[in-house]
Amino acid sequence: MMAQTNLSVRVDEQDKKRFEVFCSQTGMNVSVAVNMFIKVVLREQKLPFEVKADPFYSEENLDRLQKSIEELDNGNYTEHDLLEV
């Protein structure tokens, strides 16, 4: 048998309780579920779900926003009426 070690993870209290209920309903405990997750990640060498960044926070967009703020601060802007369609 392989040596085992503990893994400590910080989780929101409500999420933890709900996850424990889910695990119980599926006939396993949290430890089994976390070990399953780890095994899938190691076997497939990827997370078993998509992780992507919000494009709003891209470097290009943040630069554009900063330039717009600078233009506003320098008085370089045009006021428009809000049109309802």
Image: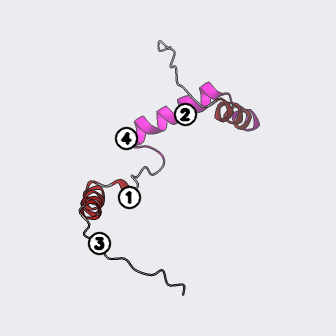
Write down the quadrant of residue 32 in the picture: top right
Marked residue nearer the N-terminal end (3 or 4): 4
The amino acid pointed to by label 3 is Tyr
Q: Quadrant of the C terminus?
A: bottom right
Q: Which colour scheme is used?
A: secondary structure
| 61 relative to 84, above or below | above
The amino acid pointed to by label 4 is Gln
Q: Residue 36 carries which label?
A: 2
Name the residue carrying label 1.
56
Magenta region: which residues? 23-48
Q: Which residue is drawn at 26% across and 62% down?
A: 64
Rendered location of residue 11, percent (x, y)? 58, 29
Name the residue carrying label 4.
45
Marked residue nearer the N-terminal end (2 or 3): 2
| Mark 1 vs mark 2, CA separation in Å | 33 Å
Q: Does the magenta stretch include residue 31?
A: yes
Q: Does the magenta stretch include residue 17?
A: no
| Mark 4 vs mark 2, CA separation in Å | 14 Å
